[in-house]
Image (cartoon, rainbow, N blue to C red):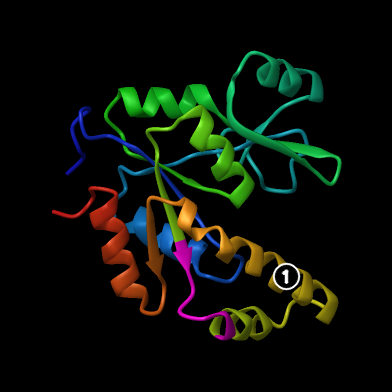
Amino acid sequence: MAPSQATARLALLTGPSGVGKGTLVALLQERHPHLWLSVSATTRAPRAGEQDGVHYFFKTRQDFDALVNSGGFLEWAEFASNCYGTPRAPVEERLSAGTPVLLEIELEGARQVRKTFPEALQIFLAPPSFEELERRIRGRGTESAEAIQRRLNRARAELDAQSEFDAVVVNDDLEAALSELEVLMGLSS
């Protein structure tokens, strides 16, 4: 059952690479189809199979800059010569319609949202230990040793920031972490 407009809330989920954000978000969407996962805007070109408004809102640099200048983003950043951001209007439209909204977001984006949308529930997803996080990242087997080290260095800094968040969920048991997220987000029955 979808929550009423009065209980619809923006929640954001942050945590280091390899902690399980994507897995938990997919499970939340599966269990709660009314939950809307925010779609980011980007200035990069669409990749094969990507659809505007589904995977990203694809914007020209000029259109993106206009949104930045008008306060049209909850957060935004430039990475590898492309801009990425969370458009404010679709989030506010969903919340006004009573739909709970989730952002899966990086630490710096979460800090921006704290300023632009302070009523958002900010959740940090943490690993049971740094060693377990390292095991998960290395276990992917998809990156060079140098790339893994960069991820681990970044993860240390992100873990140091978890006290900035409204809640910390430790992902040591997927089902328990999922249940805790559901309670925090008001999705449990």
Please provide the residue range marked out in magenta.
Answer: 125-131
Which percent across, then down, holds residue 122? Answer: 42, 47
Image quadrant where residue 170 sits = bottom left
Q: Tell me the residue at 71%/38% (across/down).
A: 77
Q: Is residue 96 magenta?
A: no
Q: Tell me the residue at 80%/72% (across/down).
A: 147
In this view, the residue in front, 42 or 48, is: 42
Relative to residue 11, is residue 3 drawn left or right?
left
Residue to which mark 1 is pinned: 153
Q: Circle 1 sits in a helix, a strand or a loop, which is it? A: helix
**Is residue 106 visible to the viewer in this orientation of the structure?**
no
Disc 1: CA contacts within 10 A as few (<14), some (14-19) or many (>=20): few
Which percent across, then down, holds residue 30? Answer: 34, 57
Residue type, label 1: Asn
**Is residue 97 visible to the viewer in this orientation of the structure?**
yes
Relative to residue 182, is residue 125 drawn left or right?
right
Relative to residue 63, is residue 186 drawn left or right?
left
Q: Locate the C terminus by quadrant.
A: bottom left
